[in-house]
Amino acid sequence: MLLAHLAFIVWVMFGALLTRARPWLAALHIVSVVYGIVAELGPWPCPLTLAENFFEVRAGLAPYQGPFMLHYLDAIVYPNLPSALVAASGALVCFINLLIYGFRLYRYRAKRKVQ
């Protein structure tokens, strides 16, 4: 589950770099980015976190409390930062990805008008 979490985070952060000329992959990435924003800013737990906690309990371990990013990455990547700042930073990365798509769409439409 840890690898699934990390893979999803990397996909949300850098997926726009892989989607050029692949509309179906771009659509999947946009949905992932929107979900990332909702997961960061909303009060709902991530399904991967719920699954990870479930498997930890089944393995006899005490499940961690709170979001995945705060549990595993906060102390390493964001030492002594408020959780609201961590969430806002994650949402900002997602919004930047959406801006990339907006710019691509703008260029595509401008190119179509010229032709």
Image (cartoon, rainbow, N blue to C red):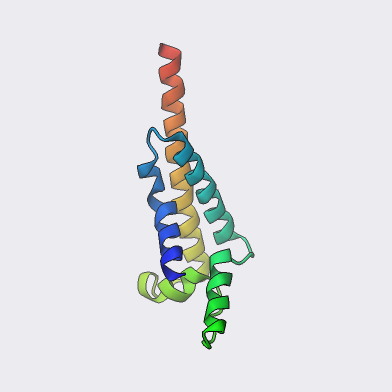
**Residue 18 image position (x, y, % from top left):** 36, 43
> Where 30 sits versus 8, above or below?
above
Quadrant of the image occupied by residue 76: bottom left
**Which residue is pictured at 56% across the width and 83% down the height?**
57
Quadrant location of residue 47? Answer: bottom right
Q: How many numbered marks appear?
A: 0
Which residue is at the far front? 58
In depth, the one of 80 and 49 nearer the eye is 49
Q: Residue at 42% x, 53% y: name it.
A: 11
Q: Is residue 29 above or below residue 72?
A: above
Residue 46 seen: no
Residue furthest out toward the top: 115
Tell me residue 19's x, y (percent): 39, 40
Residue at 47% over, 35% down: 102
Image coordinates of residue 112 in percent, x first then y, are 44, 17
Residue 98 visible here: yes
Residue shown at 43%/74% (left/top)? 72
**Relative to 43, residue 53 above or below:** below
Q: Residue 42 location, x and y as percent?
A: 62, 60
